[in-house]
Structures are given as structure tokens and as C-alpha cells.
Image (cartoon, rainbow, N blue to C red):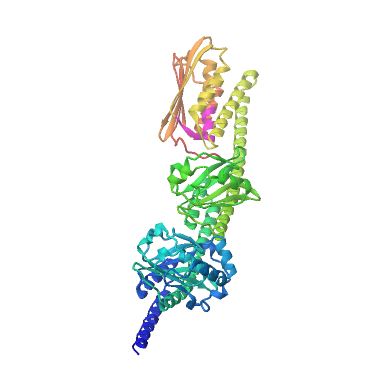
Amino acid sequence: MENLRRELDQKTAQLAALREIGRAINAAWELEATLALITRKTAEVMGMDSCSIYLLDNSDIEDLGMPSTSSASIDRASADVGGSGPPPSWRQDRVSADIDPDVRSAASAGKYLVLKATTGLAQESVGVARLRMGEGLTGWSAYAGRPVGVADAAHDPRFKYLPETKEWAFQSLLSVPLVNQDRVIGAMNVQTRAYHEYDADEVELLSLIGDLAAGALEKAVLYERMQRQITELSTLAEASETLTSPLYLDEMLGLIVEMAAQVQHARGCSLMLLDEEEGDLILRAMHGFGSDYRDKLPLTVGEGIAGRVAQTGEPIAVMDVRRDPRYYYPDVAVREGLCSLLCVPLRVRERVIGVFMCYTGEPHTFTAEETGLFQTLANQTALAIENSRLVVNTAVVREMHHRVKNNLQTIAMLLRLQLREGPQVNAEEALGESINRILSMAAVHEALSERGFRLVDVRQVIDQVARTVTQNRLHTCPDLCVEVTGDEVTLPSRSATALILAVNELIQNALKHAFAGRESGRLAISVRALPPGYEVVVSDDGIGLPANQPEKRSLGLQIVETLVTQDLGGHLAVERGEQGARATIRVPGPAGGGQDS
């Protein structure tokens, strides 16, 4: 009678424990919280020193077809319990007879169980400790689809010690499989520090908890997957908005790699574009890395993992780049804390234009879902890059057309002014001056092409124009010294062209009049930044002009005055003297401002 009452009390306590765990599990939704709650409550109600849960790696959770090991059909009476278990030969026969063939094939394929939660083992081993299906007592339980309990676990031939868990302090171990809807999804174990033989009631209780846990974990996995998909869709929507927004290419790529790192929960992401002329992959954007990664040398197509992806157009996933011989920079990976890599091609209409890379800091198996998401983002990015290039090329063509039209209009204006001089103008001299004006405009646009069609350093172009013009006039003054000094002043093309043409006219005017009959002379041109404007002074030490001579504007000075006042919005001052002349162009506006029109 006393034994019956004790058994009844024990069953009542177990049912109360199960109800408590069931209520707690039903209240939990997030996977991490659910795992922590199950291990903590199980250790409490069973009076164990440790409880741990191992789950199949995300990429391995699939339908393994286990009708014989569903929650309704596990034969707990045949659990391998007590001591170190039956002899290995008998145990192997039982395993072969009891395990579904699909489960054996899963084990032979090298599926991994990963420690996801624990109350007694080292917390730093969570997510790191791994067992193959069938490896260790816990792996054996998942492989066999039935419980196993050993009082002296370390001496059982199936036991495998994982150093990172620091489980040397524990002696006994009881493990049960986690099965949900005919699928093994992991295993759960409890351990004690002291020698402890597990009885049938403890096996039954842990098995029932395992049944509850498997369903709850499946619910939490689905919830986590749904949340991740929501995040991924939101990120893709944000990425699409970024890809279609009017950003510069490098700014857009920087945002994309940052968003990719967030959605992939990655240590960092980078993007390399193919230089089709050189055949090199050039780093264009990165997030999460330091200078060591940024300063890597370019890779050629076919070289390294990224080069191989660019060559074949197929994704490559690597578990540890620090040990993979195909990875060219293992030392950089060590310094940057990089481990697993997923590299996918950036492809537009079957043409690879670059690669997209995602790194983790810990060993990670990239699932088909993760690879598919990353490839989708890469495809969108590749299309946006191609569209951006088309827009830039169209803009460049439009800008070039616009500038050619402006220059032709300027040339036409100068020729009209030349015509007004009438028949007294020497045709050869007029043609030479016109050629110099056209060469001056050409010098501006040569400088523009070198600086990317944006701004021109006018001092540099003035120096080039002055030497070109004076070279053609050295026969009139063989020992002419030309000096160009001053500050760097940058102007947009329209303003730069007007200023260079004006300076060209002043130089030609000085060469024509200042050094007549002289073998030597000095021509000085200075450029000064006068924020928010600038000043250009052209002076010579020529014969000069009498102070009382009536002022008569030559064609050259008329052109200069028109360019300075109308095109630049500035002021021209000419000072005449007995020892040379001095022409000053002063523009009050911002040196780098103005619109090209």
C-alpha cells in the first residue's frame, strides 16, 4: 500500500511538472527563449544538474520518414538504460534492426547536431559544440530514435567528450530523441555530477518532456522563420527602393552591402566589380571590415574563390576560408575574424559583372534559403549597376553634345567679331588667332577629360595655353620668358572656357604689341583665389603705351571684355604705362560655382 501511494505521489508530481512545462512552453514563441525555458524547467522538475538540447543544423532539418519513431510509437520500455549498456555487438544489432533506413542514410550523409541551449554546460559552447548523427550518446539517441541512459557515461564506448562544453564534471547521462511529425529534429539530454542510474519513470518523464519540447521547438522555428522572412522582405523592399533611387553608384553599393550584412546576420559583406579590360575583380563596396580587407590586391577572373565564381557564374560556399586552399588571403581572414563564406555572382543577362560576398565570424553552413535570398539580392544589385552605367553613359553623351554645341557657338561668335574688322585685317594673322582660340578651348576639355568631366584647374590650363601660344611667336621675340604662378582655382567647363579664352586673347595681344622689335621680354600670369572669387593678372615688361594716348579697344580686348563681363560676370581693368601693360580680370563669384549651360 505504501509503495502504491509513493508511486501515485511520484506520478502526480510528474504530471504537475509536465503541466508546468506545457504551460511555459505554450507561452513561449521565440526560439532562443523557448530553448532556454525548456532546459531550465526540465532540470528543475527532474532534479538534474544539467539539461541540454541539440538540434539538427538548419540545413539538415528535413523529412527523414520515421513512422516507427513518432511520439506515439517510440518503445520506451526498450530504452538502453543503466550501467554502460549492453555489449557493443548486441547494441549494433539492435540499432540496425530498429532504425529506419532513411535515418541511417541521413547519418551516413554526415548530418550534424548542434548544441542550442544548456543549463549546466559551458555557455560559450552553445552554437559551437557539434555531434554527427550517431556520434556520442546524444547522437546515438537521435540516430537510433530511442532513449539511452548511462550511469557512468565517460566509460561507455559510445561516449564522445566535447572539450568546449567542459562536461568533464558530469558522470551520468540520459538522452532522448526529439521527434515531431515523424521527423527527428534533434535530441535532449540530462546529466548529473554524481553516479546515477536512471529508472523507467525518469526515462518516461524526459521522453514526455521531449515530445512537448519537439512540438514547441517546431512552432518556435516556424515563428522565427516567419519573422526572418518578414525582415528579408522588408530588406528587399528597402534594397529595391535604394537601387532605384537617384544615388551615385558607390553610395548605392555601400548601402546595399550594409543591408545585406544585416539580413544575412553576417560578420561582413563586400562587393567586387569586374574590370572587363583588365580582367580584374576590383573591390567597390564593403561593410564590417577593416583596412586589412580593404587593402587586398585585386583578383583576376579564375583566381581564388571570388575569381572562380566570376568565371563559372555559380555560387560557392566555404565552411572556413582560413583553411581552404582556394582562398587567397587566409592571413587577412584571421586578422579580420572571418570564417565561413558565401560568394555569389552578379549576373546580367548571362553576363557576370562581379561577385557578392558574405562572411560569418563562426563556422556556418549556408542553407539553400540563405543562398537563394543572397542570390536574389545580388541579381537586383547587378541589374541596378547595369542601369546606373547606362544612365551615366547617356548623361556623358548628353553633356559632351551640350559642350560641343556651346564651343561651336563661341567659335561662331569670335569669327563674327573678326569679320567686323573689315578687309584691312590680315587673313593669315586672323586665321592664326582663330586657331589659337580653338586650341585654348581644346586645352580646357582635355583637362576636363582627365578630371572626370567635372571641374578644371584653370592655372594648369593657362600654363599649357601660354606655352602653346608663345611657342608660335618665338620668331618675333626669341628670348621671351613666360611665367605662370598662383593658386589652384577650379571652375566648371563653361566658366573655365570663357576665362581661358580671355587669357589667350590677352597673351596674344601682348605678343603682338608689347615686344615689337625686341629680342627678349617677360610675360607674367598670376592666378589668385580671392574667396569667394578669383583674380587673374596678365602683365608684361614690353614697350608700353603713352599715358596720354586715346584708348581704342582692339578686337582682342573687345573679346576679353565681352567674355569677362557677360560670361563670367566679372570686371576687366587694363593699366598702360611706359614700361609694359597690366590687365586684371576679377570675378567676385564663387570659384567653383556656376552652372554649365
The x, y position of residue 439, in whole percent, is 59, 26
Task: Compare residues 295 and 559 and report the one nearer the observer.
Answer: 295
Across the whole image, how many numbered discs are drawn on residues?
0
Q: Give, as a single range, the part of the protein colored magenta.
A: 488-501
On screen, residue 566 above or below 214: above
The x, y position of residue 157, in whole percent, is 46, 63
The x, y position of residue 464, in whole percent, is 53, 24
The x, y position of residue 331, in whole percent, is 46, 42
Visible residue check, residue 40 = yes
Q: Residue at point 53% right, 50% down? A: 357
On screen, residue 140 above or below 272: below
Q: Main secondary structure of the magenta part?
A: helix
Quadrant where the C terminus sits is top right
Quadrant where the N terminus sits is bottom left
Task: Compare residues 422 and 309 and report the one nearer the observer.
Answer: 309
Visible residue check, residue 553 = no
Residue 482 is inside the magenta segment: no
Residue 291 placement, left or right of 325: left
On screen, residue 29 above or below 127: below
Q: Residue at point 61% right, 34% down? A: 409
Figure quadrant of residue 376: bottom right
